Image (cartoon, rainbow, N blue to C red):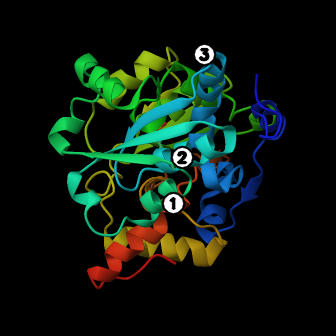
Amino acid sequence: MLSLHRPTLQHHILNEIAKYTTIDLPILKEKGVQLTVKREDLLFPEISGNKYRKLKYNLIAAKAAKQRRLLTFGGGFSNHIAATAFAGKRYGFHTIGVIRGEELAHGPLNPTLSLAVKNGMQLHFISREDYRKKECIDFIKNLEVTFGAFYLLPEGGTNALAVKGCSEMIHALDERFSHIAVSVGTGGTLAGISKAAFPHQEVLGFPALKGDFLQKDIRNFTSEKNWRLLVDFHFGGYAKIQPDLVAFINNFKEATQLSLDPIYTGKMAFGLLDMIRNDRFKPGSDILMVHSGGLQAITGINNILKKKGEVLLL
Ligand SMILES: *Cc1c(COP(=O)(O)O)cnc(C)c1O
């Protein structure tokens, strides 16, 4: 049973249809293409966008299993770490974040990690070498010896229940769109969307990191063939922030009032507008771009840009 003094998960299930923002840019008129943003970022600003979708059925499963402790993995800027910490506080779980990089334990925590701690998460820093063992049974067993039994959420939060949650992003009101664009980390969100998309829709995934290991991972979670990956917009890899990406995000914000994050959604929007500019969409295309959130990372990224003397994100 969920305890009564906490907001229940069921309550949120009633409130999770995201709003839309229509984008008005000269290039769209010129090319005869419509672009609408699905504002998953507004659902729960603290559990931004897709990370809420991915947690939902996992939290329900953890409650059903009477598990009071969640353990998961992530890097220093991880939206999934931030979301898990917040959800744990809100729904009454003790949370443990196993963080990649021992060096992060020394000196002040970055904004993502200090907010996680403020939300009650216990951080456990490990070396990059140990972090690579995060899927090994012995390694998990050792964590159980250290912390006691826990409900395990994988890195990035992607598992079958997460994909189920993500498929709820797409519903009857989305039928008019010809394409759905989404940013890709593990591909769990893309897999969920591909399952829920209408037969005439094509799902376009924009990986935020390098490598083509993703195709296979995504096929583990969806048997649909309605999706493809656009692999040219990763800007050098995960959390690599280049000045032309910062300039794009800042220009986009000035033109549309919409904030994008530099790790995921900024790269997707850059790629999408690049494709529109290069006539990769027929006139009449009606594109839905999923804003999966991630804005919590901006403060921490700006701290790094400031140290390097580079232009900051607005
Ligand atoms: C985690 C994340 C993604 C990627 O989601 P996956 O399901 O891992 O592909 C995209 N956008 C934002 C903002 C995220 O935090």
Q: Tell me how many marks there are.
A: 3
Label located before the other in sequence (3 or 1) = 3
* Local SS, label 2: helix
User: Dividing the picture into quarters, in which one does residue 192 lie?
Assistant: top right
- Res 26 → quadrant: bottom right
Query: Is the Cβ of the residue at disc 2 closer than 8 Å to that at disc 1?
Result: yes
- Residue located beneath label 1 in the image: 115
Horizontal and vertical percent for residue 264?
Answer: 45, 53
**Of the residues under marks 2 and 1, which one precedes in the sequence?**
2
Q: Is residue 220 above or below residue 42?
A: above
Asked whether 227 or 314 is in front, the reply is: 314
Dot 3 falls on a residue whose secondary structure is loop
Whether residue 48 is visible = no
Q: Could you say which is closer to the camera, residue 89 or residue 289?
A: 89
Dot 3 amino acid type: Ala
Which residue type does callout 2 highlight? Answer: Ala
Q: Which mark is residue 85?
A: 2
Q: The residue under label 1 is which amino acid type?
A: Leu
Q: Residue at x 58, y 53 (%)?
A: 293
Q: Ligand 1 near label 3 (Cβ, under 8 Å)? A: no
Q: Secondary structure at mark 1?
A: helix
